[in-house]
Image (tube, helix red, strand yellow):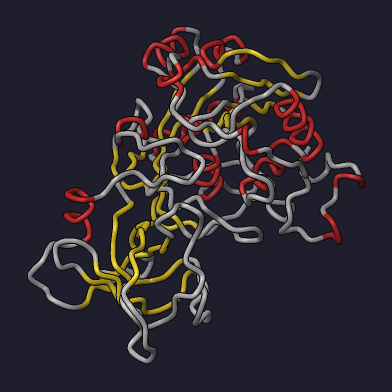
Amino acid sequence: MSATAALAPGDRAPHGDPAVPRVRFDLPPERSATEPPEARGQDRDEVRLLVATADALHHTRFRQLPEHLSPGDLVVVNTSATLPAAVDAVRRPHPDAPGTEEPVVVHVAGPHPDGDDTVVIELRRTDGQGPITDARVGEVVALPDRLELTLVTSFPDPGVGVGSRLWRAIRTGPMGGRGITRVLEAHGRPITYGYLAGRWPLASYQPVYAQVPGSAEMASAGRPFTTTLVTELIARGIAVAPVVLHAGVSSLEEGEVPPPERYAVPEATARQVELTHRSGGRVVAVGTTVARALETVAAPDGRMWPGSGWTELVLGPDRPPRVVSGLITGWHAPDASHLRLLEAVAGAGLVQRAYDAALAAGYRWHEFGDSCLLLP
């Protein structure tokens, strides 16, 4: 039964808008995880885990994950590694308007889908309180090592001339300096937000199985895994398979959908997904990035093909999942577009019950927070 078919009339989004998550909740500031669990004296896999099934909600720890899966299930992980994608910069006045230079933080989301040596960036305030909302086409941002980027179009909608959150930027100015990759390697740091109490090294933002550098922000659903936990899954007959999806910046505003992202699904993983379905097992995606990658190459009848490139797929009421039957996820902010994907996989009713229970039990939110296993 599809996720949309499982929804009761009361689960529908306000005014029938399919872009608005059905799940509604208020997130108190004290629910944000302000530091990695290691700074709280815990191992990665000691964060809390809420297991949500159609029949019950169960509170446990992430290291008990194998006890809630079965031999023959398949856990699919994202092996993208996180880049030091935040860098201090200077925003120069627009050529057509007077003004003064302004310090900013540039978040580099990754290359632009069209290539041509352009990147997608976000301009953020230095106090960590949000994006720059009055940038416009033609502005120049000066990064370290003589690298200058000029905003050429808004992204993903090139028709927004002023106030876009994301921008397609092209290298301009002196050409003797370093390129964006070298600048990030020399001067970059992990992207952070205002709820964190300090800065943490890049190693704190890497899942243990990360192999392929490319994500602007950590695919954080996989952070609680340890090598010991992966070994236990395999020893119990629960297979683990890789995909790659390079995540962009996660600071989506209300109503925004995920922009195009780069992915790769290997042939061996595609075959394992098909075999798992034929054998009656469950395909459990570790995070919304994995679900997006797998569903991009899934046919309506559940057949799979290997593939790579850019995906614009957004799961929701009009496109329920075809192969993903379970999801390991962190806890998302109210109105986040990722909630639509959770609803598509598990149904809005189950997701709402899980979020209500997590809030009542004091679970922590965001990339260093607690986890949820949705098994509809």
- Residue 135 quadrant: bottom left
Quadrant, the C terminus: top right
Query: Residue at left 32%, top 51%?
Result: 85
The vertical placement of 58 against 322, above or below, is above
Query: Residue at left 44%, top 79%?
Result: 136
The vertical placement of 271 against 67, above or below, is below
- Residue 183 quadrant: bottom left
User: Is 180 positioned to the left or the right of 289 in the image?
Assistant: left
Residue situated in front as seen by the camera: 51 or 122: 122
Residue 305 x, y percent position in the rendering: 47, 45
Query: Residue at left 33%, top 52%?
Result: 86
**Residue placed furthest toward the front:** 100
- Residue 53 quadrant: top right
Quadrant, the N terminus: top right
> How many numbered markers are drawn?
0
Residue 55 x, y percent position in the rendering: 81, 19
The vertical placement of 39 against 20, above or below, is above
Residue situated in front as seen by the camera: 154 or 345: 154
User: Is 226 positioned to the left or the right of 317 in the image?
Assistant: left
Residue 354 x, y percent position in the rendering: 73, 29
**Residue placed furthest toward the right:** 9
The vertical placement of 40 against 289, above or below, is above
**Residue placed furthest toward the bottom:** 96
Residue situated in front as seen by the camera: 57 or 176: 176
Query: Residue at left 58%, top 18%?
Result: 48
Residue 59 x, y percent position in the rendering: 68, 15
User: Is 121 positioned to the left or the right of 53 in the image?
Assistant: left
